[in-house]
Amino acid sequence: MMTRQTRSQPLECSGDPAPLPAPCSDRLDNEQRRGAATAGWRLLRSAWHFVRQVSGDDAYERYRAHVLQAHGGQDAMTRAEYYKARTEQKWNRVTRCC
C-alpha cells in the first residue's frame, strides 16, 4: 500500500526493489568476448598491413606474389637481390627535368 509523500518522508512502496542491471562485462558471455577480441585483432592486423603497404615494407612480398602469379615458371629474385635492384633503379638514373 502506498502512503502519501511529505517533504520529510520518502514515498514507501511495498515489495522488493527491482534488481540493478548487471555491468556490461557481466552480460557478455565468452563467445561474445572472443568475437569482440577477434574483431579488435582483425582491425589491428588490417592497420598494420596498411602501414606496411604505405611505407613500402611489404614490397618484396608483393613482388614475390606477382612473380608467382604472372610469371609462374620464372624464379624470383632473393630479398637481397630485389632490394639491390630497387636501390639501383632509384639512384642510378637521371632524376632532373632538364
Image (spheres, rainbow, N blue to C red):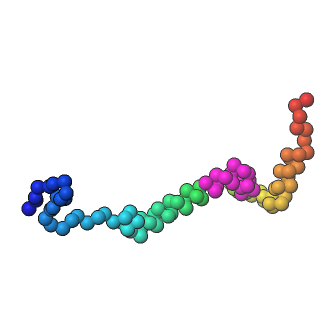
- In reply to whether residue 55 is colored magenta, the answer given is yes
Q: Which image quadrant is residue 95 in?
A: top right
Considering the image in quadrants, where does the C terminus appear?
Answer: top right
What range of the chain is rendered magenta? 47-63
Q: Which image quadrant is residue 74 in?
A: bottom right
Position of residue 88 relative to residue 11, above or below, is above
**x, y (%) of residue 16?**
18, 68
Residue 67 visible to the viewer: no
* Main secondary structure type of the part rendered in magenta: helix
Asked if residue 91 lies left or right of residue 33, the reply is right
Q: Nearer the viewer, residue 43 or 59?
A: 43
**x, y (%) of residue 69?**
68, 54
Position of residue 98 relative to residue 34, above or below, is above
- In reply to whether residue 51 is colored magenta, the answer given is yes
- Identify the residue at the far bottom of this view: 30
Identify the residue at image location x=78%, y=58%.
76
Identify the residue at image location x=84%, y=58%.
81
Asked if residue 22 lies left or right of residue 17, the reply is right
**x, y (%) of residue 67?**
73, 54
Position of residue 98 relative to residue 29, above or below, is above
Residue 20 visible to the viewer: yes
Q: Nearer the viewer, residue 12 or 49?
A: 12
Considering the image in quadrants, where does the N terminus appear?
Answer: bottom left
Q: Nearer the viewer, residue 44 or 64?
A: 44
Q: Nearer the viewer, residue 63 or 41?
A: 41
